[in-house]
Image (cartoon, coloured by chain):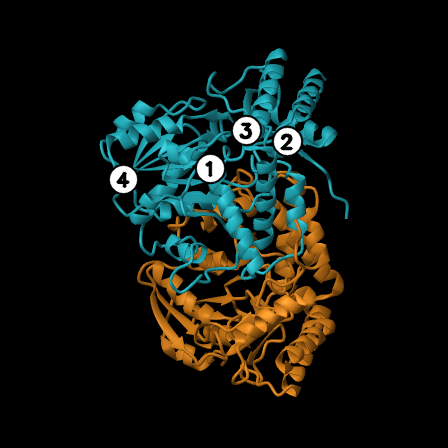
Chain colours: A orange, B cyan
Amino acid sequence: MSVSERTLLGPGPSNPYPEATLGLAAPLLGHLDPEFITLLERTCERLRSLWGTENPLTLPLSGTGSLGMETAFANTVRSGDVVVVAVNGLFGERMCEVAGRYGAEVVRVDHEWGRPVDVQRVLDAHPAPKLVAAVHAETSTGVVSDIGALGRALRERSDDTLLLADCVTSLGGMPMALDEWRVDIAYSGTQKCLGVAPGLAPFTFSERAWERRVQAPPVWYVDLGLLGAYVRGGPGGRAYHHTAPTAMVASLDAALARIEEEGVDSVSARHEAAGARLREGLQEMGLELFAAEGHRLSQLTSVRVPDGVDSGKVRERLLRDYGLEIGAGVGPHAATVWRIGLMGHNARLDRAELVLSALRRVLER
Amino acid sequence: MSVSERTLLGPGPSNPYPEATLGLAAPLLGHLDPEFITLLERTCERLRSLWGTENPLTLPLSGTGSLGMETAFANTVRSGDVVVVAVNGLFGERMCEVAGRYGAEVVRVDHEWGRPVDVQRVLDAHPAPKLVAAVHAETSTGVVSDIGALGRALRERSDDTLLLADCVTSLGGMPMALDEWRVDIAYSGTQKCLGVAPGLAPFTFSERAWERRVQAPPVWYVDLGLLGAYVRGGPGGRAYHHTAPTAMVASLDAALARIEEEGVDSVSARHEAAGARLREGLQEMGLELFAAEGHRLSQLTSVRVPDGVDSGKVRERLLRDYGLEIGAGVGPHAATVWRIGLMGHNARLDRAELVLSALRRVLER
């Protein structure tokens, strides 16, 4: 059976690091094998290091990034809790929906899509929310927000509010310092800047969040009380919860090792250089960037579809003629924006030149 | 970094089919790529065929088998619903716990561990439950129950009760006919008889269950209304829900293709022959099988640890000297039972001889 090879320059998945693919295909370990436990502990430690946190409860959840969001709300929200959500794209929208299902009284702070989160407006939205949630790198728009400024301002005001950050498109592609930023709860996905296939949700939960967590939340699968007993162990040793996806964890571990070896700063610089060249090249072509200047992600660039150009046809041609995937826009911008990712293994100058050249050719014809 | 190679003869994961490993390592596709959509549809069709169902809503969920259980209850149970659960091992126990979290009024029908589900007792437990749940192949004890007898008896009595079957350890290892058996909801896991790494939960939901489903259940990640719009499509086409774990789905598809090529009957016969030889060999060694005679799974054999033998030490030696993993017992039988799986790619006579010989050697010393 023939298999097509794609260059995945959409909003994710991206092409995995070669090390991650080797990790996937390595001989499988059982989830209770002492060797796998060592590997899992190492993976958790590597996630802590990359995220800049000492949270003991840091682990890869057995699902995609969306399961990270579910886990965050399921374990923190009780019916009637006030949750302030900064909405500046699809994933902020989704946080409102998910928080609402757990009975939160959601206070939305709406922003124009393509703009970063306004810290002051979020602070002003409610004097004492139980939780504030914001997206670090909005996958739907290519915008980065200053989570550190938000976290420090919240903590200065009160000790009563927890901060949740969606890091799906940021982890592995830019510097992170969750503890310094006063982030209590964060999740990511493996298929973006971490350079691994989709399937796991790296997750971290502070001791402050742990003390205030929901006991026995409705969702058994992501009950952190139970998951904690497996990952952290306890007086009776590790308690079996569910079969960990061992191949995916081995793959994540291998990608994290690769990132460590290259150096986190070099990896971030690589993302920056590739993103800068892409933005420059797109503007040279006369295209207009969508995200607000000064708040553009390097790993994910949003660009307006030129007037009169059929967004879908361009994407189809790129896929057909070049095996190259870029993303459409989302929601109100579905047909008027493209999203181009240079993430993880694809955060390279050669990928930037490839997509620029291919896009130029397709637009010229 | 060196990697150990294990022969995984515990209760799962088992060693994947070589085809499944190749599928994992194949060039990654995006989750919206037309080629991936074709692959996903083919996978769903192959799952239908293997399960013996025509349920349109049949798909691999993005999590491990436990997420299948969660999805089943989250989408069927409303607060106060009567749910009868047949408990004859750990996974029946867990169904009580999960159903309870969704507010079910759980009616337990307890059985001695190692015994199959008693259809009459389940029928007698309640005259008109909303849902009856039972485990087809109990991973904790190695027992098979007659789900077809249960399903037909329930349907004969009334049209008001849905039947849920846990097929984690049965799918891919034995003949299945869900529609004939009148099963409405079923889930499995990839890491047992399907011969794939852990990480996906094949799931199926009948039209009867769909009509009675919970609208907007608490758990967004497994809301079948939303997942259905992605997998089945709708008037507006496929609605994006979350990024599918494309590498794992490609791996599952490859394993299902392998099973089809070998022939489902041959695969079942291979499991039967391997299991029969294992049971025979264990009894020749003077060991006592745990599961009730006539109700023993071929793919998973439970055997009592001989008096005076340290269960853990034997398992450690098998792992250290032979790279061979077998499982401990569970719950009250943790130290007194071993569980030996011959599943999927490992359902072979050579694996049976290997574990018999190695176990004999370790017990003799």
Residue B51 — which label? 1
Q: CA distance from mark 3 to mark 2?
A: 16 Å
Q: Earlier in the sequence, mark 1 or mark 4?
A: 1
Residues packed near mark 2 inside 10 Å, few (<14), some (14 to 19) or many (20 plus) = many
Residue B265 — which label? 3
Give the amino acid at mark 3. Asp
- Looking at the picture, do discs 1 and 4 lie on one chain? yes
Residue A187 — which label? none
Measured as percent of width and height from the top left, residue B212 is found at 29, 47
The residue singled out by tag 4 in the image is: B130
Give the amino acid at mark 1. Trp
- Looking at the picture, do discs 3 and 1 lie on one chain? yes
The residue singled out by tag 2 in the image is: B346
| Disc 2, SS | helix
Name the mark nearer the viewer: 1 or 2.
1
Q: Earlier in the sequence, mark 3 or mark 4?
A: 4
Measured as percent of width and height from the top left, residue B58 is found at 44, 46
Name the mark nearer the viewer: 3 or 1.
3
Toward the viewer: B105 or A209? B105
Q: Earlier in the sequence, mark 3 or mark 2?
A: 3
Q: Earlier in the sequence, mark 3 or mark 1?
A: 1
Proximity of marks 1 and 2: CB atoms separated by less than 8 Å: no
Give the amino acid at mark 2. Asn
| Disc 3, SS | helix
Q: Is residue B354 visible?
A: yes
Proximity of marks 3 and 2: CB atoms separated by less than 8 Å: no
Toward the viewer: B248 or B84? B248
Residues packed near mark 3 inside 10 Å, few (<14), some (14 to 19) or many (20 plus) = some
